[in-house]
Image: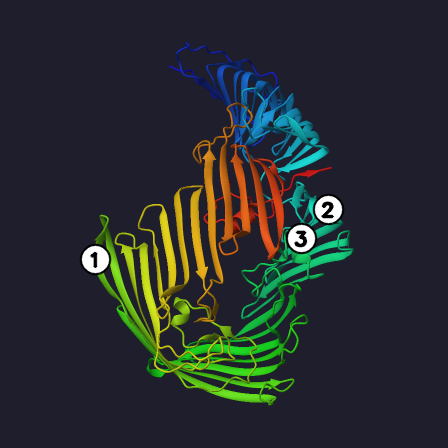
Amino acid sequence: MPVTETAPEPAAAPASAPAAASASPPASAPPAAMRVPLNRADAPVEVQADRIGGRPDVEVEAEGNVDVRKADVRVQADRAHFRQDQQLLTARGHVRIEQAGNRVTGPELQLQLDTREGFMREPEYFIALTQAGGQAERFEFLGPDRARIVGGTYTSCGTDGSGTPAWLLSAERVDLDFEAKEGVARGGVLRFMGVPILAAPWLSFPLSDERKSGWLPPSINIDSRSGLDLALPYYWNIAPNRDATLTPTVSVRRGLGLNSEFRYLEPTYQGRLNFNFLPDDRVAGRSRYALGFDHAGRSVDFDYRAVGVRVSDDDYWKDFSRGTTALLDTRTSATVTQRLLPADFRAERSLGSFGFSDAAWTGYARALSWQVLQSPDAPIVPPYERLPQIGVQGGAALAGGLRVDLQTEFNRFSPAPTAVPDLIAGTRWHALGTLSRPWTTSWGWFTPKLSVNAASYSTDRPMADGRSSASRVIPTLSADTGLVFERASKLFGRELRQTLEPRLLYVRTPYRNQDALPLFDTAGKDFNITSLYTENAFSGVDRVSDANQLTAGVTSRFLEEASGQELARFAVAQRVLFNDQRITPEGEPITQRLSDLLLLGSSVLAPNWGLDGTIQYNHQTRRVSRSVLGVNYSPGPYRTLSARYRFTRGFVGEQLVSQQAAANEQLELGWQWPVYGPAPGALIRGSGGGGTCKGSLYGVGRVVYNLRDSRITDSIAGFEYDAGCWIARVVGERVSTGRAEATTRLMLQLELVGLSRLGSNPLQLLKDNVPGYRLLREEVRSPPPPVSYE
């Protein structure tokens, strides 16, 4: 039977307290336990061991499987001595101390349990926040949240056969601040595969993913137009809601530059400002700059946003590998390419319901201008600038199930400064209104609708017919109806539910001569399943196609009975013209009664396989006018292959204009696939104690090949090597900037897990361009914690 002694807990223990009788239980007995009082009203110290002795309220001697605990601190050792008056614990023999997941092991420990101050000789340590650790000559405890490593190393790798981790940070002294979540190494040298790659008298690194000011790891970019470029970013954590990054750059060919980013977040607004400046480009012989801004705000019923990009010259997008779109969030801005840069200011305000039920009305204003980066070999026609655009839009439910929707708008259209000459400028007021009566059930729908497109123009110079002002009103009557049939089915032994969904859309629009009116925001719609079921062949307001037509189609879907997941979808649609269509995107009347036949389908019936395709078939020529066919194979994590074939004969809007040669025919291949190594997720990285890192090599890339020109137009290809505690990436990119020219760049990155990433970052490029790409490690939230050095 074990002997357990629990001492009383007075406020203070006199130094002359009598010694306690020692107890020596048999070797087979469980450990004894003694609860030792503290000089403060905190958690008590609990000691467990095979044998316990000492003097009550003065000291405790413990031997054999010693386990000492106080609050969140636990010490294990072969032997221990605790002085209550000094709160001093001395432990020897296989000592292990743990706190909040952090642990330190070694031969000897001295620690004051009340202040958490002390030291351990020749320790090995592990930090839970970074899953990394190392060895040291001495580990000093400087309080509950601070520690110091003297003559130590730091790594997230285990040792290989030679006893050397793959990457290792050694330092004369390392100060750890767990409250600030920061480590500072003095006299630090970073080695990779035994080779020094970075040395600094002062170097800081994060103990978490939280932000802090400091120098970020340097990055190196190599491309064919600027050569070698070195960047050394400094991250400034100004406040919890504000930060900035200043990045001095050195280009071998172009000289010195500075890139900067400032971000802010307030309760009612947020934004970002980027400014890249090269004061003296030695190649171009002039200064170069790029400015990007994005500011958005919101109140109870008012929203606004200002977003845009401006650069110094037409060749900026070619000369700098990051280009111009990197300065702009294209998901929330106006349509943008590398050569078409917007400055877009928008605001909208809720106007309420105006007393209608189920109604919402919004007023808005906008100013949109463009910078066009022209090229003599390939000039482009930019959209018109809107200075300004003011409008009101909304809808309301009326009696009898009727619904009314309205948009009315005023625009001032001006050609962009570098647009082609002879473009007309002017103003336009328009109103787009609809009155509809939807009937909807679970098995179908029927929606008759009356639409009106009214517009009034005033131009700065005469239009084609000599007038400087014109107005027109064009009505459209349409009826959209569809049915949904379902039945139980079985395919390949799977219980399915199959649907059959026929749909008809009839449109009647009278002819109105619009040849003389300007084209401010109008273009022909692409021929696809969505445009087939619309009333107008044009996008925008300036043109309304005459129509006496019926679009007929049917869709069939296969749904898994148990989960409702869509396993396959097939559809066919075609438009029938009852009269010639005179207002067309290509400017020539359409006299054929049947449009091209559109067929499309997608399927995931086979495990790990996905198929999709669209075919546009011309019944007059009996040839395929356009097709897109794709297949992807994803048998598991980090294993994906995809191929996509695109073919187009040549179109203006929906009309085929060339029956001879294809305007474009290309093949796109994408992949992420393990080349060799352990299965994904099987890698285990050590913490400095033992074990090895066995790596896996992955190939990754995407190639777009023009079959007609027999050339690669765009390509990304590289390798990722995951060794568990470090990841290396080598990625090359080639982007066509013209028919006979291209820009090539090389990105090299070394990710030291638990420390930082060094080199140029290809991760965003891979995620945006490689279908199905997955990160080998979850990416650190932006901004990344910096590694600072001086």
* Mark 2 → mark 1, Cα distance in angstroms: 66 Å
How was this image coloured? rainbow
Q: Which mark is residue 777?
A: none
Q: Compare residues 164 and 86 and report the one nearer the observer.
A: 164
Q: Which mark is residue 488?
A: 1
The nearer-to-camera label among 3 and 1 is 3
Location of residue 746 in the rendering, given as x and y in whole percent from the top left corner? 61, 44
> Does residue 514 appear to the left or right of 616 in the view shown?
right
The mark nearer the N terminus, 3 or 1, is: 3
Q: Pointer 3: what residue?
A: 320
> Does residue 570 appear to the left or right of 455 in the view shown?
left
Considering the numbered disc 2 on the image, is that residue within a helix, a strand or a loop? strand
> Does residue 771 appear to the left or right of 257 in the view shown?
left
Q: Compare residues 133 and 229 and report the one nearer the observer.
A: 229
Question: Which quarter of the figure is the N terminus placed in?
Answer: top left
| Mark 3 burial class by Cα count in 10 Å: few <14, some 14-19, many 20+ | some
- The amino acid type, in three-letter code, at marker 3 is Phe
Q: Pointer 2: what residue?
A: 251
- The amino acid type, in three-letter code, at marker 2 is Ser
